Image (tube, helix red, strand yellow):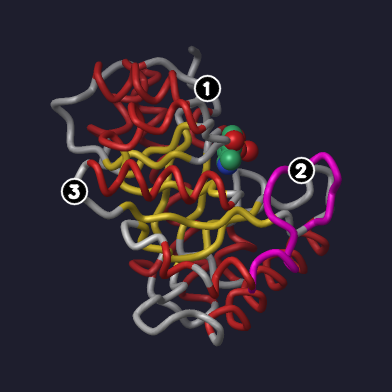
Amino acid sequence: MGAWERRLADNLAGVSNQIAEAARGSGRSPSDVTLVAVTKYVDSDVTASLVRAGCHHLGESRPQVLWQKADALRDLPIEWHMIGHLQRNKIRRTLPLVACIHSADSDRLLGSLDDEARRAARTIRVLLEVNISGDAEKTGLRPDQLPPLVERIAQWDSIALCGLMAMSGRWSDPAQSQREFAQLRQLRDRLQTCCPAGTSLRELSMGMSHDFPLAVKEGATMVRVGSALFEGVDV
Ligand SMILES: *Cc1c(COP(=O)(O)O)cnc(C)c1O
């Protein structure tokens, strides 16, 4: 194992420990939180090394890059997560490769995802992306757009809605991030009451390199961590 591979494995162990500590610290089980390693900064070789080090949930924010890596690494045990904006004309090619889409942000996208999933005779796990910070530059649905959408979710019967995703405001301080994570959890709790029977908004995808322990403290079930995993890995 080369020096960078050792560093990568150490970083992974460090992040995993921080997740476990934050989970236990808030009375949860470490196994309630999935690390989704965001591999957008690195090539397929580094990505493969991360998988060999024991990380099996990977996220990419650009469909084309996800397609390339999924193909290059098709023999490895990976569950891919689409975490960035997905254009409707990229759905057909993306859907067969991914386990979960974190970034559904419109009726139209949900409709197209549903159509494609039905064509492929499967259901697709989907999270709704919420603009929780209210930042005009951020993507995602406004909180007030969610209740009417969730009430209609049963119409898209090849979609398994399983929770919410958000990014904390990029410049926000830790206290502000934590408030936003708490807001996402509370929004989820309220939405759960207007969900059709059989839909459980269990997943909260929130927290990135600079704030994932806080996100876990506030109930994250998936953290999307990129740069912290690749620190000191010279690529
Ligand atoms: C890049 C990215 C991340 C990871 O960010 P880091 O700060 O590098 O951990 C998480 N979520 C989304 C949607 C991203 O695009």
Q: Position of residue 168 (x, y in %)?
A: 72, 52
Q: Main secondary structure of the magenta part?
A: loop
Mark closer to the chain start, 3 or 1: 1
Report whether the residue tagged 3 is closer than 8 Å to ligand 1: no
As drawn, the residue found furthest toward the top would be 235
Q: Secondary structure at mark 1?
A: loop
Image quadrant, ligand 1:
top right
Q: Which mark is residue 138?
A: 2
Q: Position of residue 225 (x, y in %)?
A: 52, 43
Q: Is residue 143 magenta?
A: yes
Please name whichever residue, 170 or 193, is drawn nearer the observer in this view of the structure: 193
Tell me the amino acid under the disc marked 2.
Answer: Lys
Q: Which residue is mark 3?
A: 121
Q: Residues within 10 Å of mark 1 (few under 14, many from 20)?
A: few
Q: Is residue 116 magenta?
A: no
Report whether the residue tagged 1 is closer than 8 Å to ligand 1: yes
From which residue to which does the magenta span run? 133-147
Which of the two discs, 3 and 1, sits closer to the camera? 3
Q: Which residue is mark 1?
A: 41
Which of the two discs, 2 and 1, sits closer to the camera? 2
